[in-house]
């Protein structure tokens, strides 16, 4: 039977956090932790820093969108509108990724206090708030995050039959509940622009 050279871990839950106790140095580490054995007698503790970005940053262009303004853009307030396809602008760029195995779309742009104080210094993802798709803190657990389905070109909520479906007279995106009139998007991979 293998042992881990005097490393004993007692795992317990405290205030809904996973805590690890190491008797050797009497320190507590709080957070979500992953324990993986490497070789025969070592262990590593990995703490995910938040959403894990995939390898490609993308710009989404709606098929049949507003002529010359077909690309999704995130306003200062986090709303989604269609605007010109300026591929180097951070407010057009999105990176597919994962949060604990769930597909998400992570925004490249940052936000300022006068418009979205709740997103200052936070990583923003596209989420469904039961009314619309918009930028929200990726750390929230009370929303349905949104993903891109490469197979059919749709942008839709995880766990709900809701997708982007065109735009209104002010170029704000609309939603379709039921997945009957979903817009389709093409993607262009771009170099991420500093937010």
Image: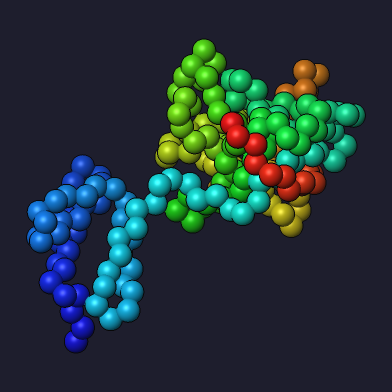
- The image shows residue 53 at horizontal and vertical percentages of 55, 49
Does 113 sit above or below residue 120? above
- The image shows residue 148 at horizontal and vertical percentages of 67, 48
Q: Residue at x 73, y 40 (%)?
A: 59
51 relative to 37 in the view: left or right: right
Q: Give the residue furthest to the right.
A: 67
Structure colour scheme: rainbow
Q: Residue at x 76, y 53 (%)?
A: 152
Most foreground residue, 167 or 62: 62
Q: Give the residue furthest to the top.
A: 114
Residue 65 appears in the rendering? yes
Number of numbered markers? 0
Image quadrant in which you'd find residue 179: top right
Does 152 sit above or below residue 113? below
80 relative to 18 in the view: left or right: right
Q: Residue at x 85, y 41 (%)?
A: 63
- The image shows residue 183 at horizontal and vertical percentages of 78, 40
Q: Quadrant of the C terminus?
A: top right
Q: Give the residue furthest to the bottom.
A: 1
Q: Quadrant of the N terminus?
A: bottom left
- The image shows residue 118 at horizontal and vertical percentages of 45, 23
Image quadrant in which you'd find residue 26: bottom left
Does 33 sit above or below residue 164? below
Image quadrant in which you'd find residue 61: top right
Most foreground residue, 140 or 1: 1
Residue 158 appears in the rendering? no
Q: Residue at x 65, y 41 (%)?
A: 192
């Amino acid at each position: 039977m293998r042992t881990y050279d005097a490393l004993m871990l007692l795992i317990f839950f405290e205030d809904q956090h996973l805590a690890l106790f190491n008797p050797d140095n009497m320190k507590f580490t709080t957070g979500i932790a992953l324990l993986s054995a490497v070789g025969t007698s070592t262990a590593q503790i990995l703490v995910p820093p938040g959403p894990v970005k995939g390898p490609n940053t993308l710009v989404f262009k709606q098929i049949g969108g507003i002529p010359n303004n077909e690309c999704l853009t995130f306003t200062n307030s986090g709303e989604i509108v269609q605007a010109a396809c300026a591929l180097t602008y951070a407010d057009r760029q999105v990176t597919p990724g994962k949060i604990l195995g769930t597909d998400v779309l992570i925004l490249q742009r940052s936000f300022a206090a006068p418009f979205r104080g709740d997103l200052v210094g936070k990583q923003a993802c596209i989420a469904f708030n039961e009314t619309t798709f918009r930028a929200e803190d990726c750390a929230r657990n009370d929303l349905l995050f949104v993903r891109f389905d490469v197979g059919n070109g749709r942008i839709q909520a995880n766990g709900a039959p809701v997708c982007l479906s065109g735009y209104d007279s002010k170029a704000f995106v609309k939603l379709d509940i039921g997945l009957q009139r979903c817009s389709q998007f093409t993607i262009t991979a771009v170099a991420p622009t500093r937010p």
